[in-house]
Image (spheres, rainbow, N blue to C red):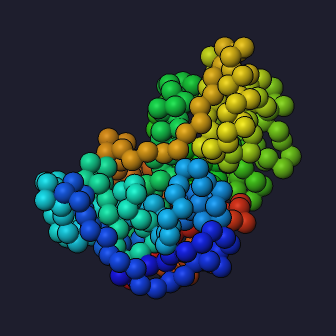
Amino acid sequence: MQAVYYTQYGSADVLHYGEQPTPTPKADQILVRVRASSVNPIDWKVRQGEMKLLTCHRFPKIPGRDVAGEVAAVGDNVTRFQVGDRVYGMAADGVGGAAAEYAVLAETSAAFVPPLLSMEQAGAVPLAALTALQGLYHHGRLLSGDRVLINGASGGVGSFAVQIARALGAGEITGVCGPDNQELVRTLGADRVLNHKEQDFTADHSRYDVIFDAAGKSSFSASKNALRRLGRYVTTIPDPAGMVTGTFAAAFSDKSQAMFLAKNSGPDMALLSAWLQAGTLKPVIYKTFALRDLADAHRLSEKGGTPGKIVLTVE
């Protein structure tokens, strides 16, 4: 199969487009002919070597986690899917990435593409939307009526988080983003929008039940005074130093922090699919690249500040 891969850590220049072995699905997996994927910051952070403790040093590596396409083959124990089904989800752990003509999904965590979605829209969803849902619901324990602040509200995860907070019944949603993306964040459902270049939410007089830092630009220690009693701070950026200082600070506080990476989850994908089909949740796509141009897509993502998702099409 054709794929984008790299044989050493480094800049986007290490990405190559060429032939790689087509993965073979295990008994409980499906092989997907990829039609669309997307770029997430974790893709280029792994490529740069920033997450060596969480990944392995085996090369070549195929980047990407988001998969949308048609089932090409099924494992012996698969019963939910058959060849030709439109499916999407996060690539199965440990079997390579999604920036390729074929990728493998676990049957238990894959989902049918909602009929209203194009492949490009579906390819923008899995990792970012799962991160937003799990951050707000599972880790942030967001309840109906809660006041929530989403830092990085116009980004890939943040744009989903604003909509998911609304779907979960948040009482007031405050989004933090750059000046160029404020109107977008309002249209997604934010009640208040702060310009991060002019306003520091940690110094604001407002108090929140949940602070979801999708941008990884703050910390529990810096944000805890903006939390209400029993408030929860959640971040998606692995930062061992921040976890240590935050744990120490939380030990002497009635507030808490959580740091996590999104996990494959069939029930969570089913909930996202229902929201997508109902129009409650809509992917925001900033720009689309062909698979062979993944290096340019990585460079654009690394600059930061792009609203929504950068999508890849696979012919």
Q: Tell me residue 143's x, y (percent).
A: 50, 25
Looking at the image, which residue sits at the far bottom? 18
Quadrant where the C terminus sits is: bottom left
Q: Nearer the viewer, residue 197 or 2?
A: 2
* 30 relative to 89 in the view: left or right: left
The quadrant holding residue 287 is bottom right
Q: Tell me residue 164's x, y (percent).
A: 49, 41
Q: Residue at x 59, y 60 (%)?
A: 46
> Taking 51 as reference, is 141 above or below it?
above
Q: Nearer the viewer, residue 257 or 164?
A: 257
Q: Residue at x 14, y 54 (%)?
A: 77
The quadrant holding residue 7 is bottom right
- Asked whether residue 185 is in view, the answer is no
> Taking 310 as reference, is 275 above or below it?
above
Q: Residue at x 55, y 50 (%)?
A: 54
* 314 relative to 179 in the view: left or right: left
> Taking 42 as reference, is 203 above or below it?
above
Q: Residue at x 67, y 48 (%)?
A: 215
Q: Nearer the viewer, residue 153 or 50?
A: 50
Q: Tell me residue 45's x, y (percent).
A: 63, 60
Quadrant where the N terminus sits is: bottom left
- Asked whether residue 144 is in view, the answer is yes
Q: Give the total of numbered labels.
A: 0
Q: Tell me residue 188's x, y (percent).
A: 57, 49
